[in-house]
Amino acid sequence: MAAYIDLIGIRKSYGASPVAAVDGVDLSIQKGEFVTLLGSSGCGKTTTLRCIAGFEMPDTGTIRFSGEDITYSQPSERDMRMVFQDFALFPNMTISENVAFGLRLKKMRGRYSEAQIRARVEEYLSLVQLADHGKKMPHQLSGGQKQRTALARALITDPAVVLFDEPLASLDANLRKAMQVEIKRLHRQFNKTFIYVTHDQEEAMAMSDRIVVMNKGRIVQSGSPEEVYSQPNSKFVANFIDRANILTGIVETVDGSTAKIRLASGATLSAPTNDATISGKTVGVMIRVDRVSLGEDGSDQRNILRGIVAERLFLGAKNEYVIELADGAGRISVHERTAGAQASIGDVVPLCVLPDDIRVLAA
Amino acid sequence: MRAFGNKPLVAGLAGAVLLFLYAPLLVMAFFSFNASQFTGLPFKGFTLSWYEKVLENETLMRSIGASVYVGIGTVILSMLIGLPAAIALDRYDFPGKAAFRRVVMLPIVLPGVITGVALLSFYITIGFRLSLNTIMLGQGTALTCIYVTEVFARLQQLGRSQEEAAYNLGASQIETFFKVTLPNLKSAIFGTMLIVFSISFDEIAVTYLLTGRENTLPMALWSILRREATPEINAVATLVIAFSIVLIVIGVVASRGKDLVAASKS
Amino acid sequence: MEDAATPVMTTASVAVAESTGISPGALKAKKIERARMLFWLLPPAAWFFVFMILPYCMLFYYSLGSVDYVVFKPGLSLANFVRVFTTEPYLSVMLKSAKIGIYTAILSSIIAYPLAFYLAFHASEAIKRYVYLLVIVPWWASYLVKAYAWKTILGTGGLINASLLGLGVIDHPLTLFLYNEFSVTLTLAYIFTPFAVLSIYAQLERVPTSLIEVALDQGATRMEIFRKIVLPISIPGIIAGGVITFSLGFGDFVAPALVGGADSIMISNIVINLLGAAYDWPMAAAIGLIIIALGLGLITLAHRLEHQFQVRF
């Protein structure tokens, strides 16, 4: 069944470059969903968004929007509004005029009276907490206020879809947090489809219904924030989303849904798997930094590893211990919330991790 | 720390170069107020009589009218060609783009006489009679490059996102151009108009070859300036350069705005 | 409008779309895009074709012909080009013009350097704006008046003579300052110095501050920093400015007429004379073309050199 927005086999390269910016993207987005395209710069997320907006034409592939092929339609014909990284406010217009821009265009003529436009602009300005700023010019506003103006300008024409191209990238950290809450609130309030592009995994985790992780022009994983966090399907995703320890081991046996994996240090780990064919193969083992702890608690449910404390870093609310496993099996970082030192550099310490907190990845 | 080298020495040398750039003009202006018959010292007292004489010079005054006509025509013509050329260069990739840019910029690097000779042979072949209009066509073509550089710099600085935002909000091409692009280019266009007018006003190389029966200011000036310096000539020259400096200062500030220096780096 | 499209105007993307048979939607969208491009590109391209390319072609056509009793006779002869290099005064005037052009380029680069250096390294942001304005204004200001202005300094009634007379060093005004190659070169260098400043400055501005800080940190002397870091990086700017200065100086006819003497006529004065009094159109066209070829050749060469010397960060 067709989704609300469908991207089918989108491919796009620029100029003579042999490397495609977007290299075969298939993506379905449901109505009302908050989807984030996440990836580092050059992964193709912005190009994908610009294809959806109509600023770029894909070389091949189709984009459908409520059942209609919009791949090659003009940007102005799409019921989508974009919020740009550099705000893209019109410097020659006041904040009110900027917000009203979409309502005063020829294609909207007759839809709203001037009085209605004014009332609507007031309404949307107060929606983004800029009620008293309507008469100001863009250059008189702070970065956060500018982006809120852009939000109001995008929402006022009541589009079906709002696109965000790294809208918070040029704001400082505190403001970014506040704006995340605000955008999330607007999504709940308007229940529109939001497609959001960012390179900031924390931002993606905090806001999205679904995260689409991209790398080298392709989608590598798509799922809820919880899914991509706890069940990454590749080393790339595991590394990109938050902090992960990735070790390498050989699967000795697969017994039902449990794999026994031997590390280079000789230690074995039990980990859940639903793939019996990995037996005998080399695999990656992912353990999140906050899902492993120092010390052993006696329960035989847990996997125990041993290593030497190589480094201790103070991170504020927590400490990070870097543990060097024996025989070059690798290093593991451990985040401990307890204040004060639990171990000192050079100590040999045991580590324990629940089998369910281990994720087996293709090597 | 960026500054290295002997600060007073560098500043002193830089000052000396600026002095070199302005001293001849200042000396000329200074002598134009000299109550003596001759250019030069001693300074026999301040007078404006040379300026009065200039204003009484009918040939000169008449030529100003012709030059204003040519100047305005040149400003409009070069804008009509330069603005779309800058937009095309900024927005699109097309085969021969580099060649197109080179052709447009050619008048910057080739002596004006060449543009003049080429156009003259063209006019004669197709049977154009030389007039103020032929000067206008020549200057308009030669000065288009100034629009292209100034407007192109502004377009690059603006980027595309404002126009994209306008399309995205549903604006048509025409609406976007008039409501978003043009207002952003307004000051660059206005500034360049002043610069182009100022250059056209006393442009000699192209004018010299394309001039018809009616004399423009540069032609009138040409015959005057070739004579030995006199206070009256100094007065004419001072008036011309002062006018041209005022236009250019306003023009450059308007065109490049706050990023006066930055625009040159592109 | 479509029919008038010259080969320059067909876009590669359209060609690709047509050959690979992409969907009609894509084709239509590309057509719209192409129409928009042509809307902006076609008028100026057509204009430059008619008022620049055609005239240059015309010049070429004339240069191959000859004149018989003030009547132009078309031809296909290179005789005029041969004459330029074999008949006096053409060759010697050409060489002299080139000499003056080179001196002009060198002199204006030398004069410009300290100011460009000051702008790039010493001027505070606030001062920079004003100094930059002070440089760009004389560049665009009245060419004629700038060429004339030196007369008030070098002329018989000029500042130098008047001062020397006043001091009693001399009792007749000296004419040695004006109406010679020196005054022509000085005047041209004066006119083109602002351009050289802008050109060198643009290049110096690329020198990263950190590079100088590292050098200072390592104990390099100012002279070493200048010789080993700044000067090499500024070379493309000097070349770029120098070539254009040379080309414009070489082809100038104003300075020789205003401040030059009888023996300092330059090649452009000859061109003008050939068009007027001598009425030898083909010869003027041939010289014009040689000037163009020289200019374009040098600029191409300069591009290559610039590319070669350009330091990439």
Image (cartoon, grey):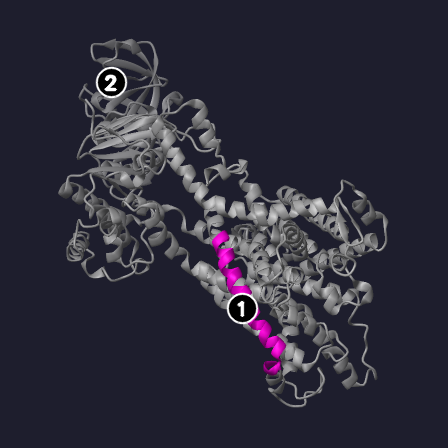
Kindly identify the residue that appears in the image at 27 percent across and 46 percent down. B169
In the picture of the structure, the residue carrying the numbered disc 2 is: A271
Residue A153 image position (x, y, % from top left): 24, 49
Residue furthest bottom as drawn: B45
Q: Is residue C64 magenta?
A: no
Q: Indicate left or right for C231 with B246 as reference.
A: right
Please provide the residue range marked out in magenta: B54-82
Residue C232 image position (x, y, % from top left): 64, 49
The circle on residue B68 is: 1
Residue C81 image position (x, y, % from top left): 79, 45
The circle on residue C306 is: none
Q: Indicate left or right for C238 with B64 as reference.
A: right
- Let me know if residue C26 appears in the view: yes
Q: Chain of mark 1?
A: B
| Whether marks 2 and 1 lie on the same chain | no
Residue C301 image position (x, y, % from top left): 68, 43
